[in-house]
């Protein structure tokens, strides 16, 4: 099939508003928008400014009304606890109405914020959709974050209600949520009015009288209730998703209702090549943007069946788990992060477990969240014998900026490139002064404003930070904070972040945030955290600390305490396990820490002595320490 990509991209270029008005036809509106875009609503403008709609209606009610009631909306599969459950669209609607009723009784309504801190269970998705139904704004917090991170989000969003669970389950350990939740509420200056807790049999918790309510009891009491969908403006917020910024204070990415639906709906058929009724699996977590867009909203908007998988690619119970899920639930398309495939390959280098399963209905693998290294792509192509498609996007955009659209016909693959810009995105590469660079030249990747529907209109309660972080540096463009180049054929290559964000097993983390936590240790005088290359996770953080030794404790003791501090403050997901005491940190004469040079040394890359370095001897000391730890080799 020849690709229709160029034709479709050109149709958007020639008439962007017409293109998006056409996509708006795919969703139900209480009041149809008469215009696509209002440039006066902020710098990005508002998409479908006079449209009135409801996202939950489009995810559930419309499908039930159209005869999809008995189709599975969601299949929960937890190899970790050995549970499976299929929920039809009709049953999902009933659960969502019951929970929406329970939330309304607690005074939660349009515009109120609800924090959801839950593991990968269907009830988390019920809670998300119930918020959408009543116009409340959810903010899901990933279970691998510690109490302090949860507190930051409760406080910033001023959550009226928190929905949580008694526990999450990681291989070999139960993560008790209640102590984390209690500590977070205590740390937050803003207190929620109420909390609802899902008790899981694997570890039940004691409910706090007067505050906590039992999820199951509420559902029973509200069963059968009919709760109408609250009409919201297309531009009203659907959710806030906090993501790492350059400081310990996360950025609250806001997502709207109308533009988000139009963009995701388009992506389901044009990018992922799906037909309604087929099974789609995003093996991620609802705590991340991939989970929001492609475990919950995209598949349900499009009438697909979504898989909610509580497990890992390896160890639950083995590296064949993904193939078992694909064959058992007839998955047509799988989306995950490259790190998951690196983990599987490490356990089963020949992909021999694949042969045990019938993957005849399986069509494609999509990868995102971090750079897809050609080696991993080629291995996946070989063992799966389906197209393996890299695509590039961010929490901020909510859907693909650049990809290879399967539904329009695949373009030739260039390994190391997520292919081409999607309609809606005019992607350019600029030098630091804001001038376009020639094809093949590395620079700052930016997107010409306005961004398409689905992308963030602002940051929650932080319009100035939004302007400063994304719009100020290159006027007229959105700064992606990724560096890379575009080749002569228009293919993008994403090479690195231009800020201090690192990607650990597909999880986005801020080294600046980690430095803030590390500096909290009383013995740490100065510190630097960098991301160093890791064969499985892509990157892992490594900390360098200068300590005062007035307390007479060993370097090892302080290092251990710093590791614990980051785990307690940010969470286990930071995978912060490497800390090295050094005498001094390498700096420029103006006092800037030379993190990029340290990273190159650690990764064994070529590096040059920075002309501005204050004392070249410090880099030798760093190399010495890294060599001793087996991280860098001398002579590299
Ligand atoms: N709740 C509590 N703790 C969690 C958690 C959660 N939801 N998710 C992860 N953690 C913990 C893990 O238990 C681990 O703790 P440990 O230090 O005690 O071992 C730590 O956080 C790091 O977890 P993770 O990044 O998952 O690493 P891992 O070594 O356990 O597994 C992979 C490695 C590659 C198997 C795993 O990262 C993976 O499945 N990645 C898929 C990528 C993905 O889903 N990306 C999302 C964006 S698409
Ligand atoms: P997140 O907001 O967690 O989705 O992380 C977004 C960042 O992950 C991007 O800015 C990139 O740095 C990186 N990223 C995501 N997808 C890709 C990809 N396909 N190739 C390279 N980097 C990617």
Image (cartoon, rainbow, N blue to C red):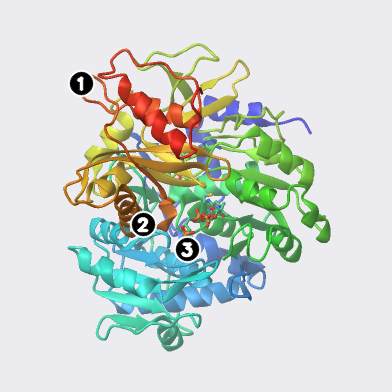
* Separation of residues labelled 1 and 3 (CA atoms): 54 Å
Question: Disc 2 beta carbon < 8 A from ligand 1?
Answer: yes
Categorize mark 1 by other alpha carbons within 10 Å: few (<14), some (14-19), many (20+).
few
Q: Nearer the viewer, residue 222 or 39?
A: 222
Q: Position of residue 456 (x, y in %)?
A: 38, 43
* Separation of residues labelled 1 and 2 (CA atoms): 32 Å
Q: Position of residue 504 (x, y in %)?
A: 48, 45
Q: Assign a secondary structure to mark 2.
A: helix
Rendered view: 474 above or below 505: above
Q: Earlier in the sequence, mark 1 or mark 3?
A: 3
Which residue is the site of mark 1? Answer: 590
* Apparent side of residue 529 relative to residue 631 in the rendered image (left or right): left
Nearer the viewer's eye, disc 1 or disc 3?
1
Rendered view: 185 above or below 628: below
Q: Earlier in the sequence, mark 2 or mark 3?
A: 3
Instruction: Classify residue 389 by image quadrant.
Output: top right
Q: Which mark is residue 567?
A: 2
Q: Nearer the viewer, residue 11 or 349?
A: 349
* Apparent side of residue 54 relative to residue 329 in the rendered image (left or right): left
Who's the residue at 19% across and 43% down the image? Answer: 548
Q: Which mark is residue 166?
A: none
Categorize mark 3 by other alpha carbons within 10 Å: few (<14), some (14-19), many (20+).
many
Q: Assign a secondary structure to mark 1.
A: loop
């Amino acid at each position: 099939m020849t690709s229709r990509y160029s034709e479709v991209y050109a149709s958007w270029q020639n008439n962007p508003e017409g293109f998006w008005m056409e996509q708006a036809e795919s969703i139900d509106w209480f009041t149809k928008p008469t215009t696509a875009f209002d440039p006066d609503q902020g710098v990005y403008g508002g998409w479908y400014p006079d449209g009135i709609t409801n996202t939950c209606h489009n995810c559930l009610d419309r499908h039930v009304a159209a005869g999809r009631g008995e189709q599975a909306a969601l299949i929960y599969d937890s190899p970790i606890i050995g549970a499976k459950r299929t929920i039809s669209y009709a049953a999902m609607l009933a659960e969502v109405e019951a929970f929406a009723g329970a939330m309304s009784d607690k005074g939660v309504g349009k515009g109120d914020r609800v924090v959801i801190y839950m593991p990968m269970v269907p009830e988390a998705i019920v809670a998300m959709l119930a918020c959408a139904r009543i116009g409340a704004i959810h903010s899901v917090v990933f279970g691998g974050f510690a109490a302090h991170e949860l507190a930051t989000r409760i406080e910033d969003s001023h959550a009226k209600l928190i929905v949580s669970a008694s526990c999450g389950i990681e291989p070999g350990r139960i993560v008790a949520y209640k102590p984390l939740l209690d500590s977070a509420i205590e740390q937050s200056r803003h207190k929620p009015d109420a909390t609802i807790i899902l008790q899981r049999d694997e570890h039940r918790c004691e409910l706090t009288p007067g505050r906590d309510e039992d999820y199951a009891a509420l559902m029973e009491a509200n069963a059968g209730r009919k709760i109408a969908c609250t009409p919201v403006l297309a531009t009203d917020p659907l959710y806030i998703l906090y993501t790492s910024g350059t400081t310990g204070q996360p950025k609250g990415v806001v997502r709207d209702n109308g533009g988000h639906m139009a963009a995701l709906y388009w992506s389901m058929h044009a990018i992922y090549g799906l037909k309604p009724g087929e099974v789609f699996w995003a093996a991620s977590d609802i705590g991340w943007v991939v989970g929001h867009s492609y475990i919950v909203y995209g598949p349900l908007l499009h009438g697909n069946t979504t898989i909610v998988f509580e497990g890992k690619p390896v160890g639950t119970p083995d590296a064949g788990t993904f193939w078992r899920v694909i064959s058992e639930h007839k998955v047509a398309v799988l989306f995950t992060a490259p790190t998951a495939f690196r983990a599987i390959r490490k356990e089963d280098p020949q992909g021999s477990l694949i042969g045990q399963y019938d993957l005849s209905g399986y069509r494609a693998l999509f990868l995102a969240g971090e750079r897809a290294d050609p080696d991993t792509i080629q291995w996946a192509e070989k063992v799966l014998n389906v197209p393996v498609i890299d695509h590039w996007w961010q929490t901020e955009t909510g859907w693909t900026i650049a990809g290879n659209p399967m539904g329009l016909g695949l373009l030739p693959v260039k390994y190391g490139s997520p292919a081409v810009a999607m309609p809606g995105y005019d992607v350019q590469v600029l030098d630091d002064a804001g001038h376009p660079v020639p094809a093949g030249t590395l620079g700052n990747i930016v997107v010409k404003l306005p961004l398409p529907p689905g992308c963030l209109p602002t940051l929650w309660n932080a319009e100035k930070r939004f302007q400063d972080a994304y719009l100020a540096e290159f006027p007229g463009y959105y700064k992606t904070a990724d560096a890379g180049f575009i080749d002569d054929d228009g293919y993008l290559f994403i090479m690195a972040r231009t800020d201090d964000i690192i990607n650990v097993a597909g999880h986005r983390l801020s080294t600046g945030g980690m430095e803030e936590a590390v500096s909290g240790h009383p013995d740490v005088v100065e510190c630097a955290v960098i991301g160093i290359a890791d064969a499985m996770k892509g990157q892992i953080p490594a900390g360098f600390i200068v300590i005062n030794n007035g307390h007479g404790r060993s370097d090892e003791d302080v290092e251990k305490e710093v590791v614990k501090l980051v785990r307690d403050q940010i969470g286990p997901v930071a995978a912060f396990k490497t800390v090295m005491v050094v005498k001094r940190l390498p700096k420029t004469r103006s006092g800037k820490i030379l993190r990029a040079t340290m990273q190159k040394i650690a990764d064994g890359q070529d590096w040059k002595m920075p002309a501005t370095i204050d004392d070249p001897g410090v880099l030798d000391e760093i190399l010495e320490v890294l060599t001793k730890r087996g991280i860098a080799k001398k002579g590299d």
